[in-house]
Amino acid sequence: MRELGQPTYRADQLSRHYFGRLTDSPDEMTDLPADARDALAAALLPRLLTAERELTCDGGTTRKTVWRAADGAYLESVLMRYPGRVTSCVSSQAGCGMACPFCATGQAGLTRNLSTAEIVTQVVAGARALARGEMAGGPGRVSNVVFMGMGEPLANYTSVIAAVRRLTDPVPQGLGISQRSVTVSTVGLAPAISKLAAEKLSVRLAVSLHAPDDELRDELVPVNRRWQVAEVLDAAWGYAAATGRRVSIEYAMIRDVNDQAWRADALARLLAGRLAHVNLIPLNPTPGSRWTASDPQVAAEFEARLADRGIPVTVRDTRGREIDGACGQLAAASKADDSLRSG
């Protein structure tokens, strides 16, 4: 504000508009001098993301947005309304460098890291739409944020941690969402998990395990060749000890690949006595992929074997299947459309 020739308290005013009133429109900032509003908004609240496509399903309670960044990079976010809560699923990178073969984003490769502001913008956009009653179910607020969109959050560590603080700090410093309602996902960057434990945050950690054995996980999650199952889980248990938060073990159920009964037993042995919860995810296959969802009966047996061994387990509610719900599919389609237009 000083550089713009304004008193410093204008920073507080502008932040309250953005985080509290959920507006970046100069016309709505009536407590700012009329002749300064446009300049201040242009300088400090630039348009970082433009909605290229928006699709809804599940009776209007799921909304997926493909965003185009200022440099042309594409990313996605999803807003999901459930009874009693609204979850914003955000991207931390445009693309992903982890190369998991069953994931559309992983197969597209990494374009770049997102900035803190680009991450926060995804949540603010959802909060704004909810406040204006633009989503089925009437006006509401974002109560939960999950870093489970495009990208590996812990590979963009600095921006993600800063975004978590902006999302959870009270207005005017942030959106005021509870840290306990934020989940940070990772494919298993063990050193970064340990670093996260030292941040003194109370966010939930989700580890995308997908296999209990190194032989298969090396194929499904290539970064496992660097940090194998035992090291990843050791870091996760360290996080649980430091925060008191139960670790979510994410497990995509892939037909005839990782859904065998013996793998359920092996997973149960790894998690026995630990502060952990298994989230089984019916795979949302990408077009042309050889990877597909487990047979429902096989998945049910897998779930039952975990439960019988005392492992807390749930099956994730699948949202957005009819709108290319697997992360990265819509962004890839938009990128391809761009290439066709430019060609």
Image (spheres, helix red, strand yellow):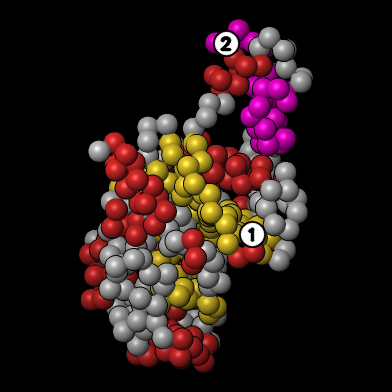
In which quadrant will I find the N terminus?
top right
What is the CA distance from the residue labelled 2 to the residue labelled 1?
42 Å
- Does 70 sit above or below residue 11? below
Q: Identify the residue shown where x is 25% and y is 63%.
A: 222
Q: Judging from the image, what secondary structure is the residue with disc 2 in?
A: loop
Which amino acid type is marked by label 2? Leu
Describe residue 166's horizontal placement relative to residue 249 as left or right.
Answer: right
Q: Which mark is residue 60?
A: 1
Q: Identify the residue shown where x is 72% and y is 17%.
A: 32
Q: Quadrant of residue 23?
A: top right
Q: Earlier in the sequence, mark 2 or mark 1?
A: 2
| Residue 149 percent across, percent down from the top left | 46, 55
| Residue 69 percent across, percent down from the top left | 43, 36
Q: Identify the residue shown where x is 67% and y is 53%.
A: 135
In which quadrant will I find the C terminus?
top left
Write down the region rendered in magenta: 1-29
Which amino acid type is marked by label 1? Gly
- Does 124 sit above or below residue 283? above
